[in-house]
Image: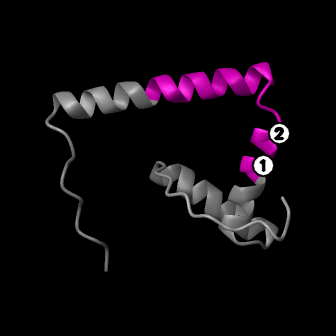
Amino acid sequence: MDDKDEMMRLHVLMPAAMNTRLRAAALERGTPATVLVRTLIAYGLDRMDDATLSQLIDDAAQAERERRAAAGREGGKKPRPPKKT
């Protein structure tokens, strides 16, 4: 990644457990979670022809299709739980 590249935002939904693991890994390495995420994304993009990564992506895409179909059958979005205080 070139330091002069314009930075863009990407909103990513992930399970709470994955978010916890991500933040813990970043903390363990003494870096912000955003730096870890950018590094992992760049690493994956550089290996898109890897068969294992390709299978992981296919599996995740199938799981997402199934999750969305189930949500649709149940009437769509559910109300958010109240924020913890």
x and y, in percent, of residue 61 in the image: 51, 28
Q: Main secondary structure of the magenta part?
A: helix
Residue at 18% across, 55% down:
79
Apparent side of residue 54 relative to residue 80 in the rendered image (left or right): right
Front one among 57 and 2:
2
Apparent side of residue 41 relative to residue 13 in the rendered image (left or right): right
Q: How much space separates mark 1 and mark 2, taking CA atoms?
A: 6 Å
Residue at 78% across, 49% down:
42
Q: Are marks 1 and 2 in contact (CB under 8 Å)?
A: yes
Residue at 72% across, 58% down:
38
Mark 2 highlights which residue? 46
Quadrant position of the C terminus in the picture: bottom left
Q: Say which quarter of the image contains residue 35.
A: bottom right
For label 1, the SS is helix
Task: Relative to 19, say whether 46 is above or below.
Answer: above
Task: Relative to 32, say whether 25 is above or below.
Answer: above
Residue type beneath disc 1? Ala
Q: Say which quarter of the image contains residue 27.
A: bottom right
x and y, in percent, of residue 16 in the image: 46, 54
Mark 1 highlights which residue? 42
Query: Is 46 within the magenta?
Result: yes
Magenta-colored span: 40-63
x and y, in percent, of residue 37 in the image: 68, 57
Q: Say which quarter of the image contains residue 64.
A: top left
Residue type beneath disc 2? Asp
Query: Is 80 within the magenta?
Result: no
Residue count near mark 2 (Cα–Cα under 10 Å), binned few <14, some 14–19, many ≥20: few
For label 2, the SS is loop
Quadrant position of the N terminus in the picture: bottom right
